[in-house]
Amino acid sequence: SQTIHQWPATLVQPVGSPLSLECTVEGTSNPNLYWYRQAAGRGLQLLFYSVGIGQISSEVPQNLSASRPQDRQFILSSKKLLLSDSGFYLCAWSAGTGRTEPQHFGDGTRLSIL
Amino acid sequence: RKEVEQDPGPFNVPEGATVAFNCTYSNSASQSFFWYRQDCRKEPKLLMSVYSSGNEDGRFTAQLNRASQYISLLIRDSKLSDSATYLCVVNERNSGYALNFGKGTSLLVTP
């Protein structure tokens, strides 16, 4: 069966520091991969999605970036964090079958910026 | 980005009650629909897909009205463990088949 791993679970970072969140998927190949952010009291906001290695699409202009160096690995990064980057970051995968499949989420990373 | 609208609630219902959630979406080209459940400070989990003819999974029934761009979720015989936020989700074809999430409806089932 497929599993998705996301780490770390919790992170506290100072303003201006860099960020790297990692997500890996097991048990499937060529998945679609997604990064979402959920700010307190708000809905899920799609940040990036990827349909293949090296293919990244950005949904919202910001100081974050994403990379997909391997088929089942998705990384969210920032060079300098802002206070507004605080939130619950979720990685998700779906089958890359060419039609809309439900997405399955990792446990999430709760990021606090001080 | 097209919108998915839900009544935020909270819905407070006693155990055993029947409760219904509604959702509207603005993108008429949407093709796939889902309900997710999110517990406090946890990740969303797929509850059920929503099919055009309507579908049922145990105590849960989902309905889709494409003409009105309206989706519903009915929960019968509510359990305490049903307390959570329920997210209405619609596909966005021009985003790598990414999904557009509503902000969720909060449900609290009380003894």
Image: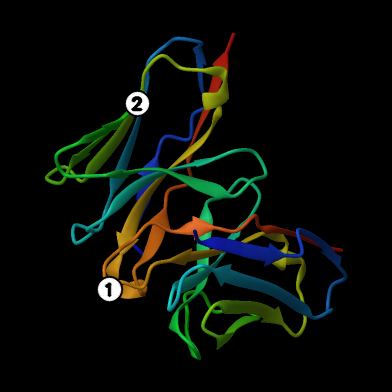
Q: Is residue B77 left or right of residue B41?
A: left
Task: Please give the name of the residue rendered at 45% of the width and 76% of the height, measured from the top-left corner.
Answer: A29
* Circle 2 SS class: loop
In the image, is residue B102 above or below residue A14?
Answer: above
Amino acid under label 2? Gly
Task: Please give the name of the residue rendered at 71% of the width and 73% of the height, measured from the top-left corner.
Answer: A21
Task: Please give the name of the residue rendered at 64% of the width and 38% of the height, measured from the top-left corner.
Answer: B40
Asked where in the image residue A19 lies, by quadrant, the reply is bottom right
The foreground one among B98 and A44 is: B98
- Tag 1 and tag 2 share a subunit: no
Residue B55 appears at what percent x and percent y? 23, 35
Residue A44 appears at what percent x and percent y? 52, 56
Amino acid under label 1? Gly
Please name the residue that numbered disc 1 is placed on: A98
Q: Chain of mark 1?
A: A
In the image, is residue B75 above or below residue A4?
Answer: above
The foreground one among B95 and A73 is: A73
In the image, is residue B52 above or below residue A37?
Answer: above
Task: Please give the name of the residue rendered at 46% of the width and 70% of the height, measured from the top-left corner.
Answer: A28
Q: Quadrant of the C terminus of chain A?
A: bottom right
* Circle 1 SS class: loop
Residue A4 appears at what percent x and percent y? 58, 63
Q: Is residue A70 left or right of residue B67?
A: right
Neighbour tally class for label 2: few under 14, some 14-19, many 20 plus, Cα within 10 Å: few
Please name the residue that numbered disc 2 is placed on: B58
In the image, is residue A11 above or below residue B33?
Answer: below
Residue B76 appears at what percent x and percent y? 37, 18
Colour mode of the rendering: rainbow
Q: Chain of mark 2?
A: B
Q: CA distance from mark 1 to mark 2?
A: 30 Å
Neighbour tally class for label 1: few under 14, some 14-19, many 20 plus, Cα within 10 Å: few
Query: Which mark, residue A20?
Result: none
